[in-house]
């Protein structure tokens, strides 16, 4: 059967995440490559302090994820398909062979800078547990106005949905959601209202930047954030990378498509483990693991074993 | 008007002639109708024409996986615009065929394992939708307006004369082949092996045009195995209620059980709770269902007289072969299944269908469709309705007569058994079905309802049983459902006074009305509590697949 590599987005960062990566030639080479592009030691970017900035968070995640995936691949543990959550989709695109790592670094840095400049205060994101999209969407639509905006952001699981917008509007949605039976509703520790139309300008700027970059056809399918389709064309992936930040990430559907394409092993790249949990509860017939918990070697053996298992 | 200029004589053998031409095209490839394994793609390119109607055997268990993978490899420049007809869209390459431009239209019955991609591809215009069928409708149409040009099916073994052995997994292979073989379609069969002598002949060689030895055995899923370890006390409670309040009350002797832990619980309660009630030999004698491992204890303790199967079940081969008085078996000893005949039996010849659902609306309409997914129907609606053409009577059928009309007829019991909430606290009883919006998005001509409310006679939840067949009006039906719908949008509407009246009138029964104490519903009541117990009951004849062994 097949293996899917999953690349986490913001929220999965940890102080020291680059320092904690295992000793491996492919990892070392990736870090050096990053240094070259950044003109600075990338290991300075994963301190508690540095990670206060979304720019550092995104750059460090991309570096750690690409390094981990490359290490696995150099051991013969190659993925059959990929998906990345939000900024993780840049890592996924690199591993699918669509985008060069160096180009991805510059793009992600730019993405971070654009986002950071956007909404200095009063905006953010929240998560609602225990309501599905069909129930939550009408609540959001009821609350949202042009001066008091709130949007559906990411559908991580059928009953785990994030919303983005003005903090006060998010709070209002929470209140109604609780009344409709939400199990939990809480703010996330982010100041940028990602994955909603408020970040349209980031999409536009990114779209322009992406035009100047050379893309290659993907070696393996890439599950898109915005449409949850298995994308097999470079242009479609380019579009997804630009539009994702101003559109909901349909993570549950994206990973479901990978399951339907035959994925029975989901492997999440370091430093994340959230996507592993999501896959574990969504796909009881598949196995899900994170490299940060299992280590490179175990992950690599399990991926190769999965490849050998007949359909 | 008679056209006097019409000189040409009309041919009555076009299909025959076309078939002869196609077969002559592969003369250089196929010897004695055997296509070499490594030349199957080339052969398919010669035997299938653009626009052909092609049946690809994929049902919910057996898959013609070698042929589907091969079809996904043909050159779309040579083979394209195919109209695929499939019981079940199960494997990734079933849809790759469309993504690659080999096929364009689909008529199917079930798409559970690919339900998101099907919905996406319809939305993206990559897949032209025919209709979504029940199994019997789809098989029926193979002989009416979906007559195939080519069928691609799977068998276990073939001999040199093309005779086929399909063994326990015969399923719908004979039906599909019949539709092509007797209408000049081309029959191509993948087999696990070519042998000198078959254990028995399931399909005669004169119905078969080509045989190809597959690289590896066809895919087979153990779909009907439920590990007793996962049966909850809530499911046991519901099982006890169903046995007392439905099986015993109506004297149900012949029945179908769907897959699911609810009905697995009932199967495991018969030898214990059912026995205590003195019901052995009185109910649940004749079954239409796959060889469920959870039925082993009931069979072993003498409850079951007969079982006819849609298909086989991985690991049950030896057990079934050792119980020919119960199962339908061939001269070689192994099970003979037949999905078409079993569906007919389940539709017309049983007292009761009992199944589960993901959503039920206030009138009892139910659906397993969830938002953004197009999963289809399979066989449940064939069995989950009252076949109004039925004439023969049985005690259970007659017991559902209401009123004293001289022309009154009986009714099949169609039972829905659900917990009021699914995992994650999602209510099963809802104001309106997700299926309605799915129908709109996918532009379906009808809403994909699994079991229509007016066919449902009983609904069982952990709260109680609603005897919907007794309802005199839609309003009464709504109230009876609300009374057992728990803390769901529908259940919150019920009014306690009304429920009292419904209980008195026999439209609603709570556990205490059936003499059941909630605290009695214990796992100790299950005749088997694990897969190991089932193996023990079978005397070591049941051989569970690895994934159901506890060391997994």
Image (cartoon, rainbow, N blue to C red):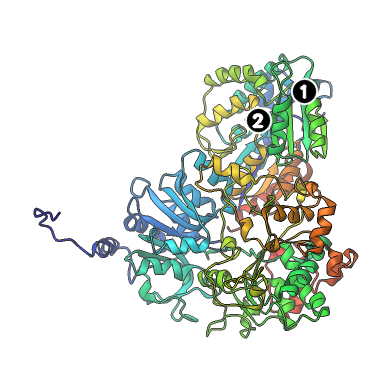
The image shows residue B279 at horizontal and vertical percentages of 77, 80
**Residue denoted by label 1:** A169
Please say if A261 is above or below B397. above
Q: Nearer the viewer, residue A92 or B480?
A: B480
Residue B343 placement, left or right of A167: left
Which chain contains the residue that carries disc 2? A
Q: Horizontal placement of A310 versus A139: left or right?
A: left
Front position among marks 1 and 2: 1
Q: Who comes first in sequence, dot 1 or dot 2? A: 1
Q: CA distance from mark 1 to mark 2?
A: 18 Å
Q: Give the residue at the far right of this rendering.
A: B519
| Image disc number at residue A248 | 2
Q: Residues within 10 Å of mark 1 (few under 14, many from 20)?
A: many
Q: Position of residue B250 (x, y in %)?
A: 71, 73
Q: Secondary structure at mark 1?
A: helix
Residue B188 against residue A57 in the figure, above or below: below
Say which chain tag 1 marks: A
């Amino acid at each position: 059967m097949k293996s899917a590599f999953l690349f986490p987005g913001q929220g999965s960062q940890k102080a020291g995440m680059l320092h904690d990566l295992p000793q491996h030639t492919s990892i070392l080479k990736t870090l050096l490559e990053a240094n070259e592009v950044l003109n600075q030691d990338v290991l300075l970017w994963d301190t508690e302090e540095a990670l206060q900035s979304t720019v550092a968070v995104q750059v460090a995640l991309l570096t750690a994820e690409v390094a981990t995936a490359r290490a696995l691949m150099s051991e013969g543990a190659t993925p059959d398909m990929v998906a990345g959550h939000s900024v993780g989709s840049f890592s996924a695109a690199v591993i699918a062979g669509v985008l060069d790592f160096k180009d991805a670094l510059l793009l992600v840095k730019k993405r971070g800078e654009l986002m950071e400049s956007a909404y200095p205060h009063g905006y953010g994101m929240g998560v609602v547990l225990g309501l599905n999209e069909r129930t939550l969407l009408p609540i959001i639509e009821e609350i949202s106005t042009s001066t008091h905006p709130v949007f559906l952001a990411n559908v991580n699981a059928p009953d785990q949905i994030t919303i983005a917008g003005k903090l006060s509007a998010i709070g209002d949605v929470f209140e109604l959601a609780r009344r409709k039976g939400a199990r939990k509703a809480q703010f996330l520790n982010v100041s940028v209202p990602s994955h909603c139309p408020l970040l349209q300008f980031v999409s536009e700027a990114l779209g322009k930047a992406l035009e100047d970059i050379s893309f290659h056809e993907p070696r393996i399918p890439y599950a898109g954030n915005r449409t949850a389709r298995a994308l097999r064309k470079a242009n479609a992936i380019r579009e997804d990378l630009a539009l994702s930040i101003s559109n909901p990430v349909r993570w549950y559907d994206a990973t479901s498509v990978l399951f339907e394409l035959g994925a029975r092993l989901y492997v999440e790249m370091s430093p994340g483990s959230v996507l592993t949990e999501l896959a574990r509860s969504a796909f009881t017939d598949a196995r899900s693991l994170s490299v940060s918990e299992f280590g490179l070697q175990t992950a690599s053996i399990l991926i190769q074993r999965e490849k050998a298992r007949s359909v | 008007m008679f056209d006097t200029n019409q000189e040409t004589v009309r041919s009555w053998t076009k299909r025959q002639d076309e078939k002869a031409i196609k077969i002559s095209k592969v003369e250089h490839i196929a010897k004695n109708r055997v296509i070499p394994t490594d030349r199957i793609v080339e052969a398919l390119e010669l035997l299938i024409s653009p626009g052909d109607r092609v049946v690809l055997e994929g049902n919910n268990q057996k898959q013609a996986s070698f042929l589907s993978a091969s079809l996904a490899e043909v050159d779309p420049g040579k083979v394209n615009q195919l109209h695929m007809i499939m019981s079940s869209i199960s494997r990734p390459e079933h849809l790759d065929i469309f993504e690659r431009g080999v096929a364009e239209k689909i008529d199917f019955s079930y798409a559970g394992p690919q339900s998101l991609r099907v919905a996406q591809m319809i939305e993206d215009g990559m897949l032209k939708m025919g209709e979504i069928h029940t199994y019997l409708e789809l098989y029926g149409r193979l002989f009416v307006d979906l007559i195939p040009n080519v069928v691609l099916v799977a068998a276990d073994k073939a001999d040199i004369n093309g005779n086929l052995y399909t063994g326990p997994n015969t399923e719908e292979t004979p039906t599909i082949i019949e539709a092509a073989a007797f209408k000049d379609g081309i029959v191509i069969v993948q087999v696990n092996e070519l042998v000198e002598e078959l254990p028995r002949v399931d399909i005669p060689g004169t119905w078969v045009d080509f045989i190809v030895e597959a690289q590896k055995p066809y895919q087979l899923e153990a779909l009907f195995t439920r590990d007793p370890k996962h049966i909850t006390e809530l499911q046991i409670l519901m099982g006890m209620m169903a046995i007392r309040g439905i099986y015993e009350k109506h004297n149900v002797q012949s029945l179908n059980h769907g897959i699911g832990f609810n009905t697995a619980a009932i199967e495991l309660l018969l030898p214990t709770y059912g026995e205590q009630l003195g019901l052995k030999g009185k109910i649940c004698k004749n079954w239409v269902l796959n060889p469920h491992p959870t039925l082993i204890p009931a069979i072993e303790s003498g409850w079951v007289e007969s079982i006819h199967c849609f298909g086989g079940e991985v690991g049950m081969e030896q057990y079934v072969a050792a119980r020919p008085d119960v199962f339908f078996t061939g001269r070689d000893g192994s099970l003979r299944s037949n999905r078409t005949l079993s569906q007919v039996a389940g539709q017309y010849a049983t007292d009761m269908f009992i199944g589960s659902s993901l959503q039920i609306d206030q009138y009892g309409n139910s659906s397993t469709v969830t938002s953004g997914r197009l999963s289809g129907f399979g066989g449940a609606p064939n069995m989950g309705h009252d076949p109004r053409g039925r004439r023969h009577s049985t005690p259970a059928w007659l017991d559902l007569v209401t009123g004293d009309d001289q022309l009154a007829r009986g009714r099949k019991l169609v039972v829905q058994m659900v917990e009021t909430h699914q995992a994650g606290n999602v209510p099963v009883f809802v104001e309106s079905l997700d299926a309605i919006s799915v129908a709109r998005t996918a532009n379906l001509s009808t809403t994909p309802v699994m079991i229509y409310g007016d066919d449902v006679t009983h609904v069982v939840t952990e709260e109680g049983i609603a005897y919907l067949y007794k309802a005199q009006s839609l309003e009464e039906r709504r109230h009876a459902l609300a009374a057992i719908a728990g803390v769901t949008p529908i259940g919150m509407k019920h009014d306690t006074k009304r429920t009292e009246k419904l209980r008195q009138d026999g439209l609603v029964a709570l556990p205490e009305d059936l003499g059941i104490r909630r605290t009695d519903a214990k796992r100790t009541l299950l005749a088997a509590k694990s897969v190991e117990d089932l193996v023990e009951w079978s005397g070591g004849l049941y051989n569970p697949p690895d994934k159901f062994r506890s060391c997994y």
